[in-house]
Image (spheres, coloured by chain):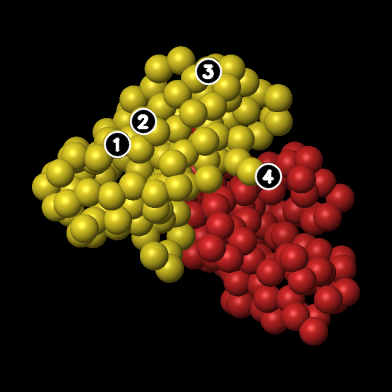
Chain colours: A yellow, B red
Amino acid sequence: HSVLTQPPSASGTPGQRVTISCSGSSSNIGSNTVNWYQQLPGTAPKLLIYTNNQRPSGVPDRFSGSKSGTSASLAISGLQSEDEADYYCAAWDDSLNGPVFGGGTDLTVL
Amino acid sequence: EVQLVQSGAEVKKPGESLRISCKGSGYSFATYWISWVRQLPGKGLEWMGRIDPSDSHTNYSPSFQGHVTISADKSITTAYLQWSSLKASDTAMYYCARRNDGTFDYWGRGTLVTVSS
């Protein structure tokens, strides 16, 4: 099982706002920043959010991230059909001395 | 333009050896660590380990230590992931990714490894 815990699935209708949670511990999210990756079907993961809430160039501002304590969240507003993808949270883990991922959340746009 | 170009899909038999590659271009290859990430069919992402191309120093996840070897040749800006004896359970997609300031900012397209008798 994954070190970081995410809901396996989430869904929403076009235009809606959805959030995806990511729960960790003091050795990872509690002491390090969180990144989010988007994996469209059949493609490689892509960096979506870094350092908790920063968007790389080209990522729409519909995507936002936040972190509090040992948990983090990804929010997607104005949901679009092209947002259907798997979303993964990740953080450095001081005990592992390496990055850890969440199990991924499969987002469906109804 | 930063690119990580991975070698093509492989079909191997159990017990065979394999080395897959990841060639970096468009940036100073020796400056950024390269990690390998496994994705089992229909499953999530797992960090396997990383290498500093400048001196070939490596770190492995405990889950993969001893099962794979990560190496690099900075003269040809290429990182490698290799197995000495494949198992059916190694069937997966393998991604290389560049580590930059705490993120994986660029990813290869992945190499599908299928191990079947």
Q: Tag 2, which secondary structure? A: strand
Give the amino acid type for the residue marked by disc 4 in the picture.
Arg
Give neighbour class at mark 2: few <14, some 14-19, many 20+ (Cα, 10 Å).
many
What SS does tag 1 mark? strand
Quadrant containing the N terminus of chain A is top right
Chain under disc 3: A
Amino acid on which the number 1 mark rests in the picture: Thr
Which corner quadrant of the image does residue B85 belong to?
bottom right
In primary-sequence order, the first of circles 3 and 2 is 3
Pointer 1 with pointer 2, Cβ within 8 A? yes
Q: Residues within 10 Å of mark 4 (few under 14, many from 20)?
A: many
Q: Nearer the viewer, residue A3 or B82?
A: A3
Report the chain holding disc 2.
Answer: A
Q: Is residue B72 left or right of residue A48?
A: right
Chain on which label 4 sits: B
Instruction: Identify the residue under disc 1.
Output: A19
Query: According to the image, label 2 marks what residue?
Result: A73
Binning the other alpha carbons within 10 Å of mark 3 as few (below 14), some (14 to 19) or many (20 upward) gives: some
At horizontal 45% and vertical 32% (from top left) the residue drawn is A22
- Identified at 76% across, 45% down, the residue is B63
In space, the residues marked 4 and 3 are separated at their CA atoms by: 23 Å
Residue A43 placement, left or right of B29 = left
- Amino acid found under the numbered disc labelled 2: Ser
Quarter placement of the C terminus of chain A = bottom left
Q: Are marks 4 and 2 on the same chain?
A: no
